[in-house]
Image (spheres, rainbow, N blue to C red):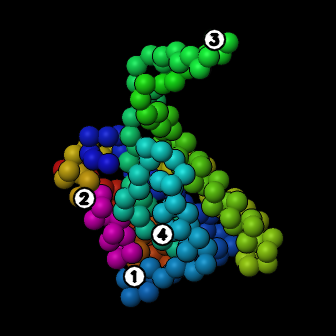
């Protein structure tokens, strides 16, 4: 999918209390645990479940994720007016005159991603693979940013890719220095 389509960046946060994390940053590289691996594999599967949705740069951090989602033709309806197709004298069927683009917006894609990961997490707990977590795994909202041009896309891809390098200074890192912590937003050029 190209940049002519709608797109967004999202950021989720995991409730970091109780020490539940998706892995750890070691030598400026993210090392995923089983939770993190499940999150990453679920992300990679998104396009196979939802027509018109593509994924791009993505990183799982110890207590949150960053990723780019491409959304094609949000809210569009089938092209043209459906035409009547007679199978025989007694039955009529209708067929759209073009492919049906996705009707999912970014919020719905994120909601489904969260639902899929929570379902897989619960299954892992039931199967005895993971310890139960007594709070919400995902926070309610997410941060998003619309990427408007190629230079903005390059900047956000770099931000996502390099995020583990900034973990020591990240405000969401429980071990970060309070003098250097804070949310690091991407400024588009």
Residue at point 32%, 40% (across, down): 5
77 with respect to 5 (left or right) = right
N-terminal of the two: label 2 or label 3? 3
Q: Distance between the residues labelled 1 and 2?
A: 19 Å
Callout 1: helix, strand or loop? strand
Magenta stretch: give its range.
155-166
Task: Return the x and y of residue 158 as percentages of the image width and height.
Answer: 28, 65
Residue at point 26%, 40% (across, down): 4
Residue at point 52%, 73% (across, down): 62
On residue 155, the disc is: 2
N-terminal of the two: label 4 or label 3? 4
N-terminal of the two: label 1 or label 2? 1
Task: Return the x and y of residue 50 as percentages of the image width and height.
Answer: 51, 47
Callout 4: helix, strand or loop? strand
Q: Quadrant of residue 108?
A: top right
In the rendered structure, are the residues bearing label 1 and label 3 in contact, judged by CB atoms less than 8 Å apart? no
Callout 3: helix, strand or loop? loop
Q: How far apart are marks 2 and 3 (CA)?
A: 60 Å
Task: Return the x and y of residue 169 as percentages of the image width and height.
Answer: 39, 73
Q: Which of marks 1 and 3 is in front?
A: 3
């Amino acid at each position: 999918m190209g940049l002519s389509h709608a797109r967004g960046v999202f950021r989720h946060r995991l409730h970091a209390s109780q020490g539940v994390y998706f892995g750890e940053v070691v030598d400026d590289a993210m090392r995923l645990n089983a939770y993190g691996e499940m999150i990453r594999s679920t992300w990679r599967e998104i396009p196979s479940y939802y027509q018109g949705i593509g994924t791009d740069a993505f990183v799982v951090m110890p207590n949150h994720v960053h990723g780019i989602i491409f959304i094609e033709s949000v809210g569009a309806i089938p092209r043209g007016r459906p035409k009547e197709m007679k199978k025989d004298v007694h039955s009529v069927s209708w067929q759209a005159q073009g492919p049906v683009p996705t009707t999912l917006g970014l919020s719905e894609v994120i909601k489904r991603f969260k639902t899929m990961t929570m379902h897989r997490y619960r299954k892992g707990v039931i199967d005895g693979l993971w310890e139960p977590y007594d709070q919400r795994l995902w926070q309610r909202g997410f941060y998003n940013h619309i990427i408007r041009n190629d230079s903005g896309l390059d900047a956000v891809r770099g931000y996502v890719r390099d995020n583990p390098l900034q973990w020591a200074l990240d405000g969401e890192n429980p071990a970060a220095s309070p003098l250097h912590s804070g949310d690091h937003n991407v400024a588009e050029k």
